């Protein structure tokens, strides 16, 4: 097997062993640093070593005992949940509108809606800061949700549009020809069939808001500080092992969400 | 006879039908236009967060104490700003180059592996994508510090005697940024390579090309759209990157985005911040626009 080419143009597996080794190392580079944080978070000492010299859960206790960290986590989750709702609903509506309208003007709308993904976040953060100040939206969860929703809308748009591409819109026509109104046909025929893409988009929106640092850094503080804002400031000053525990919890969240999207995708193929 | 007449002048029934069709077509186009109204909520949000603030920022960059001015832009020629900009470009080029060297082989292998193995590789590429930026940056801070894992190992295998300074400098920033940007290189490359028909490579072999020659003369040119998309995305994201350089650079590596933040947070200098911001914005959108014109990559970014 190792000495036979997979296709007539390939070199044998054996002769391109270097490629496998190289790619193995690149993959190690991609995932190992993050995964090493998990065992280190159970370290008993102030210095994070691998493997830890002694095991303990003291950094997890430090996290759960701290009112500031707990408050920040709560703010982050509130913002993430509201962002998910706002971005998923508005993003799905926009994707459906653009896809079914098929107008040339739609392309411009599409580019406009993709802008938040292309503009450096620091600019959005500063821009939002000056615009929100007179509206009184700075230092408030609605302000944070509004900004995070803009970041998440392009992702929802991409995900839902991909779903619509795999869906035959004639089915909706059939439902409407039998008397269903457009919204009803969408809700009962289209939406259930593009469900997986909508949920994928929603998960992306959630993780986008949960991970966002730069905007939160500028527009919220004090009681409204998010988890990532606190983490950023803590990391700038010193390496606090409590952050290893928080990081491990966040890694668990991302593994769960990534697992869910993979599951949804395998469901879509079947 | 009647058939001939009908062909010459449409019968009233056919006329009515034509009118009906016209009316239906009008109705359909009006309905399609009204469907665009569904994009309004999303547009409002993007308007509040992107369009109005960016317009405001532009206004701040050209207005001074006594009316319109280009002073803010002129100040950008000052050596300290020039240093920031050149550091930013150096780092962006370096990171893009390393991502290319690391990402191309990985995408190539993933595109050729059987589906099961390929999806495993892809999950490994997506995993950092889904993990918090801060968590990954933190991981590098811990690994690269003076008494961190990397220094321990390098000393353990006897490669170095003294711990190296790997973090809070240019080296650490480069490593951390490469780690963050690599998936943005691999994913578009993989998507393009996946569409390359294996038949081309077989045809090349048939015509007498060695595998290496077929790879360079057939496969690589066909992968160019993905290559350009990857290079541009990584480069553009690197130019405006804030979090990782701010933490891994330890304040010593001044990037464009950090300069903007500092102008506002430390010096309350909105003129400088907005001028820097407008230049960054113009360069970013300019590059993306150019690439869109060249390759039609907008369809990819725009979600098709």
Image (cartoon, coloured by chain):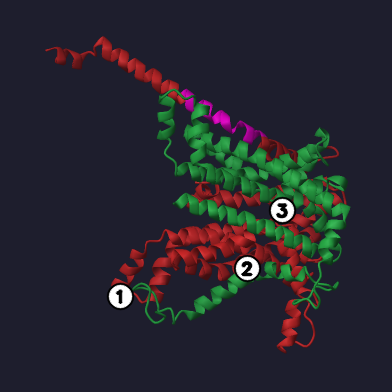
Residue A156 lies, in percent from the top left, at 59, 44
Q: Is residue B206 magenta?
A: no
Task: Give the chain letter at badge 2.
Answer: A
Judge left or right: residue A207 versus residue A139.
left
Q: Is residue B39 magenta?
A: yes
Q: Residues within 10 Å of mark 2 (few under 14, many from 20)?
A: many
Q: Is residue A142 above or below residue B205?
A: above
Asked where in the image residue B149 lies, by quadrant, the reply is: bottom right
**Residue beneath disc 3:** A211
Q: Residue at x 40, y 78 (%)?
A: A11
Residue contact between numbered discs 2 and 1, judged by CB atoms under 8 Å: no
Chain identifier, colour green: A
Write down the region rendered in magenta: B30-44
Q: Nearer the viewer, residue B12 or A152?
A: A152
Task: Give the chain letter at badge 1.
Answer: B
Q: How far apart are the alpha carbons under marks 3 and 2?
A: 18 Å
Residue B99 lies, in percent from the top left, at 60, 67
- Secondary element under disc 3, as helix, strand or loop, is helix
Q: Nearer the viewer, residue B136 or A125?
A: B136
- The image's mark for residue B136 is none
Q: Residues within 10 Å of mark 3 (few under 14, many from 20)?
A: many
**Residue beneath disc 1:** B208
Q: Nearer the viewer, residue A244 or B125?
A: A244
**Residue beneath disc 2:** A30
């Amino acid at each position: 097997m190792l000495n036979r080419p997979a296709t007539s143009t390939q070199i044998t597996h054996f002769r391109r062993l270097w490629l496998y080794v190289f790619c193995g190392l690149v993959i190690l580079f991609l995932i190992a640093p993050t995964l090493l944080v998990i065992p280190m978070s159970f370290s008993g000492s102030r210095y994070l070593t691998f493997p830890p010299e002694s095991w303990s859960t003291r950094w997890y206790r430090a996290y759960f005992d701290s009112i500031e960290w707990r408050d920040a986590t709560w703010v982050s989750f509130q913002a993430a949940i509201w962002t998910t709702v706002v971005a998923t609903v508005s993003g799905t509506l926009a994707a459906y509108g653009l896809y079914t309208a098929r107008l040339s003007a739609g392309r411009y709308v599409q580019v406009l809606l993709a802008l938040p993904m292309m503009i450096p976040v620091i600019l959005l953060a500063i821009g939002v800061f000056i615009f929100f100040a007179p509206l009184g939206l700075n230092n408030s969860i609605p302000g944070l949700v509004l900004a995070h929703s803009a970041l998440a809308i392009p992702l929802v748009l991409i995900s839902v549009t991909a779903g619509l591409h795999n869906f035959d819109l004639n089915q909706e026509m059939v439902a409407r020809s039998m008397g269903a109104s457009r919204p009803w046909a969408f809700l009962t025929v289209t939406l259930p069939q593009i469900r997986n893409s909508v949920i994928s988009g929603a998960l992306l929106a959630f993780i986008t808001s949960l991970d966002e640092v730069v905007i939160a850094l500028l527009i919220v503080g004090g009681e409204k500080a998010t988890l990532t804002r606190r983490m950023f400031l803590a990391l700038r000053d010193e390496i606090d092992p409590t952050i290893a525990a928080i990081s491990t919890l966040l890694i668990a969240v991302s593994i769960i969400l990534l697992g869910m999207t993979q599951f949804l995708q395998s469901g879509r193929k079947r | 006879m009647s058939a001939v007449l009908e062909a010459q002048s449409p019968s009233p029934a056919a006329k009515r039908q034509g009118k009906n069709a016209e009316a239906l077509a009008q109705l359909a186009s009006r309905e399609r236009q009204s469907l665009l109204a569904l994009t309004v909520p999303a547009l409002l949000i993007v308007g509040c967060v992107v369009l109005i603030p960016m317009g405001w920022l532009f206004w701040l960059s050209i207005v001074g104490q006594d009316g319109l001015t280009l002073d803010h832009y002129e100040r950008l020629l000052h050596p300290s700003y020039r240093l920031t900009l050149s550091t930013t470009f150096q780092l962006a080029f370096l990171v893009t180059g390393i991502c290319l060297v690391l990402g191309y082989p990985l995408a190539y292998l993933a595109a050729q592996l059987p589906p099961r193995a390929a999806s495993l590789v892809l999950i490994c590429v997506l995993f950092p994508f889904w993990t918090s930026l801060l968590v990954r940056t933190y991981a590098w801070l811990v690994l690269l510090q003076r008494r961190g894992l990397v220094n321990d190992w390098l000393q353990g295998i006897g490669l170095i005697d003294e711990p190296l300074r790997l973090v809070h400098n240019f080296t650490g920033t480069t490593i951390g940024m490469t780690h963050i940007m690599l998936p943005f290189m691999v994913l578009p490359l993989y998507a393009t390579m996946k569409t390359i028909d294996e038949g081309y490579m077989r045809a090349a072999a048939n015509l007498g090309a060695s595998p290496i020659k077929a790879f360079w003369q057939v496969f690589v040119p066909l992968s160019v759209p993905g290559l350009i998309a990857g290079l541009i995305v990584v480069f553009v994201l690197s130019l405006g990157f804030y979090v990782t350089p701010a933490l891994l650079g330890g304040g010593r590596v001044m990037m464009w985005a950090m300069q903007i933040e500092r102008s506002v947070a430390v010096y309350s200098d909105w003129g400088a911040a907005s001028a820097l911001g407008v230049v960054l914005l113009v360069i970013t959108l300019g590059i993306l626009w150019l690439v869109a014109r060249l390759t039609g990559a907008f369809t990819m970014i725009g979600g098709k």
